[in-house]
Structures are given as C-alpha cells and as structure tokens.
Amino acid sequence: MLKKIDFELKVGIFVFIGIIILAIIVFSISDFEIAAGGYYLKVIFNFANGIEVGAPVRLAGAKVGEVKGLQILYPEEGMRPQVQLLTWIEKGISIYADSVAYINTLGLLGEKYLEIVPGTKGAAKLKEGEILHGKDSVSMAQVTELGYQIAYKIDRVITSVDDLLSDPEVKVSFKETLKNAQRLTQEFEYLSVSAHQIMDKIKRGEGTVGKLFSDEELYNDIDGLVKDLKTHPWKLLYRPRDKK
C-alpha cells in the first residue's frame, strides 16, 4: 500500500513539473505581456489592409508590441464602418498623440504589421485605452484599378494618333511640314556657311569692315574724328555758307 502511494506521489510530482514547464514554454512563445508589463491602445482605420491578430506593432521599425484584437465599428448612420485594432504596447514605450500609424508589409509578400511613425516629445502621451487614428493604406484593388485607367487612357491616345495619321489630309500636311523643316535646315546651313565666309574676309582685312579692323591708320582716323566730335560737338551742327 505504501509503495503504491509513493508511486502515485512521484507520478503527480512529475505531471506537475511537466505542466509548469509547458506553461513556461507557452508563455515564452506567445511573448507573454503580463510578465513584461505594458498597456493597450486602440488604433482606428477605414481600411485594415489584411492585418490579423498577432501581427507585430513596430515603432520606427523596432517591435514594441502586438495586435491583440480586431473589431468592426459602426459609426453614425450614413457613415462607413471602421476597423479598430486593439494593440498591446510594451511598458516604457511612449506613443505620442501626433504619431502616425499605418499598415505596412514586410517585403513584397511578407506579413502585415502595424507601423507607428514616432511623434514629437512636445505632444501629449497616449494613455491606457486611448485612441490613435491611423492613416489608410492604398489597397491592391485601387492600384489595379488605377493601372487599368492609365492603360485605357494610353490606348485611347494611341488610337486617336492612329486615326489622325490615317487621315489623307493630315498625311499631306505632315509631308509638307517635313519638307519645310528640311528647307529651313538647308537655309540655316547656308547662312552658317555665309557667316563663316564673312568672318574669314574680316580676318583677312577684306571689305570695308575688314579694312576697319585691319587698317590701323583708318582706325586711328576714325578714332580721332570721334574724339574731335566729343570735344567740339557744335561741328555736327555747323554748315558752311555758300559762296556768292
């Protein structure tokens, strides 16, 4: 009888130790917040973007909590339903009232998480149970719809250009425009060549302008005339009398 009691006692102690070990493992895996301490905040969105319970909460990219619950809110009549996220924030982490919360994705196809952009220290700190209004993310459906609209407009533009170019009158006008552009290009080249030729003549001292630049005596005469007129401007108005 005594041996039977000792065996049952040993089995009970073994089972009790196993339960304690199991509880420790469960609490450590689930990041048990009671041991660490913390507080709850509510974050409200118009669009939850697929986030689920258990998703991490990150402040400036660092994990500081976890999403503990999701609730659909029905505001006043005529308003769209909203989604309220119940988030647990670690003790010692301050979330300011002017912080910006939005739902982000790790990588292109990674898990959803709640990202909080830190606010300023001058703002009030959010306390247990207070509400932070989140910034709605753009859904893939909206991105796809926008892509369809852009593609449709591009197709309309291409179709309009094709219709325009297929018009015989437009083709003739387009050809005339090309001919005029070619003619203008040729004339510009001709003017460029002429300008180079004129400059070469001036450098060689040919022509009136060339002589003016190259003939030092002529230049001195003109310079003296200008100086004389500046000194005696009345000579511009002087008219010699006719001899009788």
Image (tube, grey):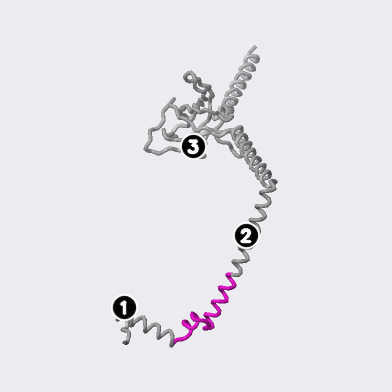
**In this picture, is 162 found above or below 33?**
below
- Residues rendered magenta in the picture: 191-216
Which residue lies at the image location 63% right of the left edge and 59% below the top edge?
A: 180
Q: What distance separates the C-alpha of mark 3 from that of mark 2?
A: 62 Å
Residue 120 image offset from top left, x and y in percent: 40, 39
Main SS class of the magenta portion in the image: helix
Q: Which residue is mark 1?
A: 237
Question: Tag 2 or tag 3, which sits nearer the N-term?
Answer: 3
In the image, taking residue 203 as reference, residue 179 lies left or right, namely right
Q: Are marks 3 and 2 in contact (CB under 8 Å)?
A: no
Q: Is residue 207 magenta?
A: yes
| Residue linked to disc 2 | 181
Earlier residue among tags 2 and 1: 2
Q: Residues within 10 Å of mark 1 (few under 14, many from 20)?
A: few
Quarter that holds the N terminus: top right
Label 1 SS: loop
- The residues tagged by marks 2 and 1 sit, at their Cα atoms, a distance apart of 52 Å
Residue kind at label 3, given as amino acid type:
Leu
Task: State yes or no: discs 3 and 1 in contact (Cβ < 8 Å).
Answer: no
Residue 98, percent across and down?
A: 42, 35
